[in-house]
């Protein structure tokens, strides 16, 4: 019976060690993915003070940028939701040599009468950096030029600043919940292993006494 109890405890410890190793690997993989820029990283936000900051952030795979005191002009373009209703208005920056398209939720771009504000001054926002080839092709087509010609001649960047699609808070909550869950489980397994080790030591002492 003593051998069976000891064997069961050994198997249980081995199981917990495997679970600890697996959970630790998952935690490491999550950290690597965040640092590599392969997934949205809500913990890192680059502050934009000049145009070069946007380009550097995109090249370094930084998902989000913070912009302050921006002047934005409405471009007459917008995105619709699944119900066919305008959900995001498309603006353009004016403070840089290169112009950037900025998508902002309709709710934050309407005046008291519900009309879209043509020019927004002193705008502060956190947006996600991405590229939207479809938008570029659409605008170029409206100007009756090629996409390459539109980008070069009109000094427009292919990088889009998408406040509407940023969803930083939602992504932040998901990552915090994930890290909290993995860390809690690792702590739980360590406590169980420590307790089992202590119980194993007491059992050995009793066996020697007998």
Image (tube, helix red, strand yellow):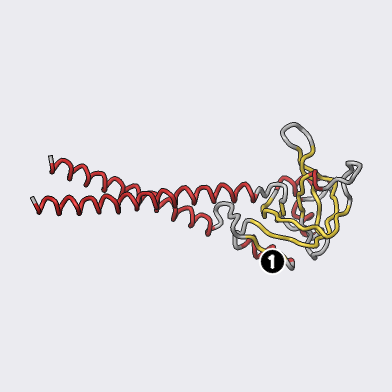
Give the residue displayed 76% in from the left and 38% down from the top: 80
Viewer-proximal residue among 84 and 12: 12
60 with respect to 85 (left or right): left
Image quarter for residue 57? bottom right
* Image coords of residue 15 (percent x, y): 29, 45
Give the residue displayed 80% in from the left and 60% down from the top: 70
206 with respect to 177 (left or right): left
Residue at which label 1 appears: 53
**From this viewpoint, which residue is outermost toward the right?**
113
Viewer-proximal residue among 65 and 52: 65
Viewer-proximal residue among 178 and 9: 9
Q: Residues within 10 Å of mark 1 (few under 14, many from 20)?
A: some
Quadrant into which the N terminus falls:
top left
* Image coords of residue 28 (percent x, y): 44, 55
Secondary structure beneath disc 1?
Answer: helix
Give the residue displayed 72% in from the left and 47% down from the top: 164
Would you place residue 22 above or below residue 122 in this image? above
Number of marks = 1
Would you place residue 164 above or below residue 71 in this image? above
Viewer-proximal residue among 46 and 191: 191
**From this viewpoint, which residue is outermost toward the top?**
83
173 with respect to 71 (left or right): left
* Image coords of residue 144 (percent x, y): 83, 47
* Image coords of residue 77 (percent x, y): 82, 45
Give the residue displayed 83% in from the left and 56% down from the top: 72
Would you place residue 205 above or below residue 9 in this image? below
6 with respect to 75 (left or right): left
């Amino acid at each position: 019976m003593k051998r069976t109890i000891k064997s069961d405890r050994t198997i249980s410890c081995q199981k917990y060690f495997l679970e600890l190793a697996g959970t630790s690997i998952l935690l490491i993989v999550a950290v690597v993915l965040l640092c590599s820029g392969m997934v949205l990283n809500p913990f890192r936000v680059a502050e934009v003070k000049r145009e070069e900051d946007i380009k550097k952030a995109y090249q370094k795979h930084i998902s989000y940028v913070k912009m302050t005191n921006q002047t934005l002009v409405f471009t007459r373009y917008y995105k619709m939701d699944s119900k066919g209703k305008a959900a995001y208005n498309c603006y353009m920056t004016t403070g840089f040599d290169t112009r950037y398209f900025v998508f902002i939720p309709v709710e934050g771009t309407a005046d008291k009468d519900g009309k879209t504000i043509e020019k927004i001054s002193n705008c502060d926002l956190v947006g996600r950096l991405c590229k939207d080839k479809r938008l570029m092709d659409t605008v170029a087509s409206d100007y009756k030029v090629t996409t390459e010609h539109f980008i070069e001649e009109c000094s427009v960047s292919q990088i889009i600043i998408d406040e509407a699609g940023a969803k930083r808070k939602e992504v932040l909550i998901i990552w915090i919940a994930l890290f909290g869950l993995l860390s809690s489980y690792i702590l739980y397994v360590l406590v169980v292993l420590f307790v089992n080790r202590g119980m194993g030591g007491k059992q050995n002492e009793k066996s020697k006494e007998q």
